[in-house]
């Protein structure tokens, strides 16, 4: 967008400058070279360098804050993010799931439920998640009633062998393992989300005896599950079926007519820092939305404890019934989405981006988060995540903490702020210079500056701007999300660029009518009438030298004026590197007209009277720029 803006400006200004100078000066070659140099001058030549340096510096600063950047452009997206979608487990909670209870359907603790859950978790060959590990750990510390002086887990490892399994998937939300004991008895043991498990159970175990699952018992079980969920416990149901089949591979079709044995209740308490981090993100303009595959009641309990609105919950089954427009309307008002599949998470992210216009980040660490991370503007993972999540991420946190992410968001905004400073100040300054050149070309009998001088001036200015990535940024700038806005660059250019042109024209008049005539003891018209070629050459060189120096002073100092809404002061000053390069750049350009290479550059020493004029013009320019800056802020609400 910025490049197209500059190209359009070149296509208008460069031909105009060429036509005016060719017509008024009579030298087509000089006019073409000058117009070309004007086109080059419009371009922020250091834009690729400044962009890369800004992002690289931002990446270094983020690394010091425990945030590793894989894709540099993601830094700007991180600062622009206004919606953060995250999973519940590990992000908002302690990520240390503990098996609190193993209960039968009457609500009593029952070791048989734990024993069957262990067989399922231990013998399944997929990725063992936190729930599997919690079951195995609990069995390994629970005494076995089968073998004295041994643990339950150790006993079961030796007594059973695996026959087959039906892997977990996010639509069934359950996993089955078929095992056989030493006597040849075969069992299919299934565990999974409570609601999905109830769909495949036709029987319930009561006092060790399988009985039909009646509507009355089903209502009692649902009430039991709801009570556990209300305590913030995640409930997993366990069921089994003896001698499911004799031969052949097992599949999903075998998960039927199961006997419900009981439930596992897990606790994953909220992080102590989660509530504060969520409040800070909300204050920074980032809405936190929870997208989880967990039960809605458990997720709602956790959300309420940390300050996320859980009054309006959208379930995965409801999402499938909505088209994108309806989903967008619901998603805007909802902060908790539960019982989601990976594809539903990805769809939610896409809808919030494309239909609601949000810049969406997604923070996850599991296999089921990879698709949503890919669909987001900024995929965020953690160093302990599974490989596919880290591969899908743009940014990796070394600590699984929203507080770390908040610091990364602020750094992303700071990086973008410094990048925008360069673009806006440079484009507006270059636009002002082109306007000045166009006006001067209409009235001056010679070029206001040679092509070489114009390119050299632009080069020195760009080198000074290299230090901008290290500059500080106002707290007000980092207080809210900052999306890329090329249109604001155009407005900034058109409103503040002409201010420099006004003082350039004053400089032209002072040089042409006062400084140069005093230095050569004759006006331009007198030299032209006398045919004094040497005198006219000296007059033109003095004029070009004066504007060369004045332009550098005004163009460079305006960076310090426009980098912040405040006046430069001991409390609000540019970074030391920018201050040093500014002084060196001004000193170099001021010295060049009196240097040994002045002749080669078409420059010559300036009279002392010029420097008094320079101080007056620069002072007035700074004052008017401050007034224009205040007017711009009053109209647009902010400077950058």
Image (cartoon, rainbow, N blue to C red):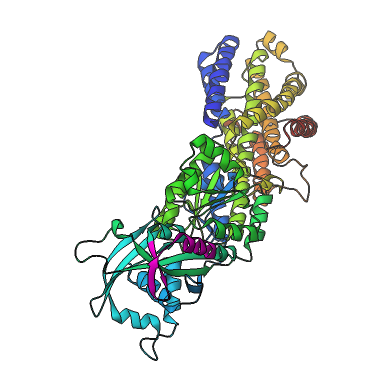
Residue 125 in view here? no
Q: Is residue 39 magenta?
A: no
Q: Is residue 161 left or right of residue 121?
A: left
> Does residue 6 sit above or below 311 in this rendering?
above
Q: Quadrant of residue 125?
A: bottom left
- The magenta stretch is 202-225
Query: Residue 360: horizontal and vertical position, in percent?
Result: 54, 45
Q: Nearer the viewer, residue 91 or 618?
A: 91
Query: Residue 42: horizontal and vertical position, in percent?
Result: 57, 28
The image shows a total of numbered marks equal to 0
The residue most toward the left is 247
Q: Quadrant of the C terminus?
A: top right
Q: Is residue 113 left or right of residue 600?
A: left
Q: Residue at x 73, y 39 (%)?
A: 561
Q: Residue at x 50, y 60 (%)?
A: 219
Q: Residue at x 71, y 14 (%)?
A: 524
Query: Residue 123: horizontal and vertical position, in percent?
Result: 32, 71
Q: Is residue 189 left or right of residue 185?
A: right
Query: Residue 563: horizontal and vertical position, in percent?
Result: 69, 41
Q: Quadrant of residue 206?
A: bottom left
Q: Quadrant of residue 400?
A: bottom right
Q: Is residue 222 magenta?
A: yes
The residue most toward the bottom is 149
Q: Residue at x 39, y 60 (%)?
A: 174
> Does residue 269 sit above or below 286 in this rendering?
below
């Amino acid at each position: 967008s910025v490049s197209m803006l500059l190209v359009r400006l070149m296509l208008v200004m460069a031909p105009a400058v060429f036509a005016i100078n060719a017509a008024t000066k009579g030298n087509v070659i000089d006019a073409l070279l000058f117009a070309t140099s004007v086109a080059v001058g419009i371009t922020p030549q250091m834009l690729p360098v400044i962009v890369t340096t800004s992002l690289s510096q931002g990446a270094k600063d983020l690394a010091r804050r425990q945030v590793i950047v894989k894709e540099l452009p993601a830094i700007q997206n991180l600062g622009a993010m206004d919606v953060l979608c995250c999973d519940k487990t590990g992000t908002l909670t302690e990520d240390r799931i503990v098996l609190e209870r193993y209960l039968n359907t009457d609500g009593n603790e029952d070791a048989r439920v734990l024993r069957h859950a262990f067989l399922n978790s231990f013998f399944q060959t997929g990725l063992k998640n936190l729930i599997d590990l919690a079951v195995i750990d609990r069995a390994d510390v629970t005494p076995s009633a089968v073998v004295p002086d041994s643990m339950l887990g150790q006993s079961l490892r030796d007594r059973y062998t695996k026959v087959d399994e039906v892997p977990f998937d996010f639509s069934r939300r359950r996993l089955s393992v078929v095992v056989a004991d030493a006597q040849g008895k075969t069992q299919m043991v299934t565990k999974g989300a409570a609601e999905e498990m109830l769909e495949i159970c036709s029987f319930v175990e009561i006092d060790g005896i399988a009985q039909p699952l009646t509507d009355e018992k089903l209502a009692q079980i649902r009430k039991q599950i709801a009570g556990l969920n209300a305590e913030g416990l995640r409930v997993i149901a366990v069921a089994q079926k003896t001698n499911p089949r004799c031969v052949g591979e097992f599949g999903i079709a075998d998960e039927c007519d199961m006997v419900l044995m009981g439930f596992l209740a897990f606790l994953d308490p909220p992080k102590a820092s989660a509530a504060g981090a969520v409040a800070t993100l909300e204050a920074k303009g980032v809405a936190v939305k929870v997208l989880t595959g967990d039960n809605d009641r458990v997720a709602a309990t956790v959300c309420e404890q940390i300050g996320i609105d859980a009054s309006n919950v959208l379930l995965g089954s409801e999402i499938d019934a909505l088209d994108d427009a309806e989903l967008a309307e619901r998603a805007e008002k909802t902060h908790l989405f539960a019982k989601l599949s990976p594809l539903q998470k990805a769809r939610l992210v896409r809808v919030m981006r494309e239909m609601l216009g949000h810049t969406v980040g997604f923070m996850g660490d599991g296999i089921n988060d990879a698709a949503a991370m890919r669909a987001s503007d900024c995929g965020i993972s953690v160093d302990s995540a599974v490989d596919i999540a880290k591969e899908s991420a743009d940014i990796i946190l070394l600590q699984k903490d929203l507080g770390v992410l908040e610091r990364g968001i602020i750094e992303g905004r700071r990086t973008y702020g410094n990048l925008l400073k360069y673009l806006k100040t440079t484009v507006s300054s270059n636009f002002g210079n082109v306007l000045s050149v166009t006006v001067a070309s209409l009235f001056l009998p010679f070029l206001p500056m040679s092509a070489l001088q114009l390119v050299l001036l632009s080069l020195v200015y760009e080198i000074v701007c290299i230090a901008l990535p290290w500059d500080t940024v106002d707290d007000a700038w980092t207080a809210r999300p900052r999306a890329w806005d090329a249109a604001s660059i155009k407005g900034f250019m058109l409103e503040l660029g002409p201010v420099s042109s006004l003082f350039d024209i004053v400089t032209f008049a002072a040089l042409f009518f006062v400084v140069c005539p005093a230095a050569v003891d004759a006006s331009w018209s007198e030299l032209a009438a006398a045919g004094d070629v040497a005198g006219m050459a000296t007059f033109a060189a003095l004029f070009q030298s004066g504007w060369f120096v004045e332009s550098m002073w005004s163009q460079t100092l305006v960076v310090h004026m426009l980098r912040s809404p405040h006046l430069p002061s001991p409390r609000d000053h540019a970074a030391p590197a920018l201050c040093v390069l500014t002084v060196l750049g001004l000193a170099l350009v001021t010295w060049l007209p009196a240097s040994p290479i002045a002749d080669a550059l078409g420059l010559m020493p300036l009279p002392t009277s010029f420097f008094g004029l320079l101080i007056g013009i620069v002072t007035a320019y700074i004052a008017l720029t401050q007034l224009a800056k205040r007017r711009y802020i009053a109209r647009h609400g902010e400077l950058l």
